[in-house]
Image (cartoon, helix red, strand yellow):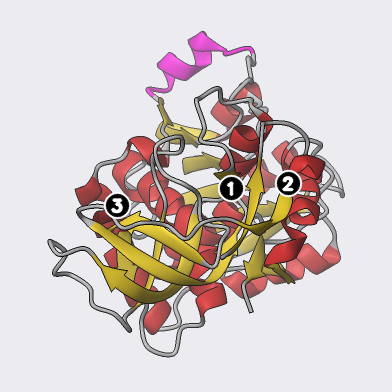
Amino acid sequence: MKAAFIEQTGLASSIQFGEVPDPILQAGQVRVRVGAVSVNPIDLYIRSGAVAMELPKPFIIGSDLSGTVDAVADDVTRFKPGDRVWGIQQGPGVHQGTFAELCAVDAKWLYPIPDEVRNEDAAAIALVGVTAHLGIFREARLQRGETIFVHGGTGGVGSAVVQMAKAIGARVIATAGGETKVNLCRELGADEVIDYREGNVAEQLRKLAPDGVNVFFETLREPDFDFAIAAMAPRGRMVVMAGRDARPVFPVGPFYVKGCSLHGFMLLKASVEEQQAAAEDINRWLAAKQIRPLIDRVMPLRDAAEAHALQEKQTLQNQGNLAGKLVLTTR
């Protein structure tokens, strides 16, 4: 089969595309004929070696996938050949990634694709959608009628947060850069959008939420805690899910005086049950067209090295070059 892989960790240019052996099913696994995959920041960290781990050689990159069940292990009953599924490959270093024509995935990490939902959309919502859901509901416990501020409303996770928060009846304030992204953020359901390229974000947010926001969802790598804590209402909840190497100053005094809480989390440490609950909500909202994954562009799988380079500009260099996910297809 064809796959995008690395022989050793390194630059995006180290990604190769070519023939590798087909995966062999193990107990509890499903083999998926991959239709689409998407790029996530964690993929960059594993490929570059920033997250140190032993990887097989060659190592197929990638986490998200969607496609059609090709075969199932004898002990798998949840799926059968022909079923359409999406999911997140977990346990890098133990399992090969998803950027291939075929991928063996533990059945517990796969979910059915609702009718009429495209492979591209299912792959694009996978990791970012489950991440957004965990942050909003398990961590921040956002409620109907509360106000949430999304710092980066057109990114992969941010755009999912905007839509999920709106789906439950929260008031959503988000940031975006430039007129095009501001309009896109509004289309996703944000009640108010602050253009961070125009004026002072903190001042604009204070006018929009003079009593503070109940939830501050940070998608950026370098949180400004002085800004965030000043923007939160008493007992406000702040969620962080990025910035692996970030070491920002933290203003303890204003934080505890307001009775705020800080929630950091990683999807890959969430339980099977927690991720299953998130997937069920996501599928319901996808089927009802209450959420749609934001896709910047669709590329062929052979362009995986280019896709990683583009994602690095967004994630590591803060260039704001993407509005949504990079999706790659096998066809």
Name the kind of residue labelled 2 in the image. Answer: Ile
The quarter of the picture where the N terminus appears is: bottom right
The answer to whether residue 261 is above or below residue 204 is: above
Residue 74 in sight here: yes
Callout 2: 10 Å neighbours few (<14), some, many (20+)? many
Q: Nearer the viewer, mark 2 or mark 3?
A: 2
Q: Which residue is mark 1?
A: 61
Q: Amino acid at mark 1?
A: Ile
Q: Which residues are magenta?
A: 249-259
Q: Are marks 2 and 3 in contact (CB under 8 Å)?
A: no
Determine the CA span between mark 2 and mark 3.
Answer: 30 Å
Q: Residues within 10 Å of mark 3 (few under 14, many from 20)?
A: many
Residue drawn at 64 percent across, 75 percent down: 187
Q: Which residue is mark 2?
A: 15
* Viewer-closest of 204 and 320: 320
Q: CA distance from mark 1 to mark 3?
A: 22 Å
Q: Secondary structure at mark 1?
A: loop
Task: Pick the quarter of the image with the C terminus.
Answer: bottom right
Q: 173 left or right of 63?
A: right
Left or right position of 113 against 199 = left
Q: Earlier in the sequence, mark 1 or mark 3?
A: 1
Query: Where does the image place residue 113, in percent across and percent down from the top left?
Result: 37, 77
Q: What amino acid is labelled 3 in the image?
A: Gln
Q: Nearer the viewer, residue 174 or 107?
A: 107
Q: Front-most of 302 and 289?
A: 302
The residue at which mark 3 appears reads as 275
The image shows residue 311 at horizontal and vertical percentages of 74, 49
Label 3 residue SS: helix
In what element is the residue under mark 2?
loop
Residue 142 in the image: x percent, y percent? Answer: 35, 50
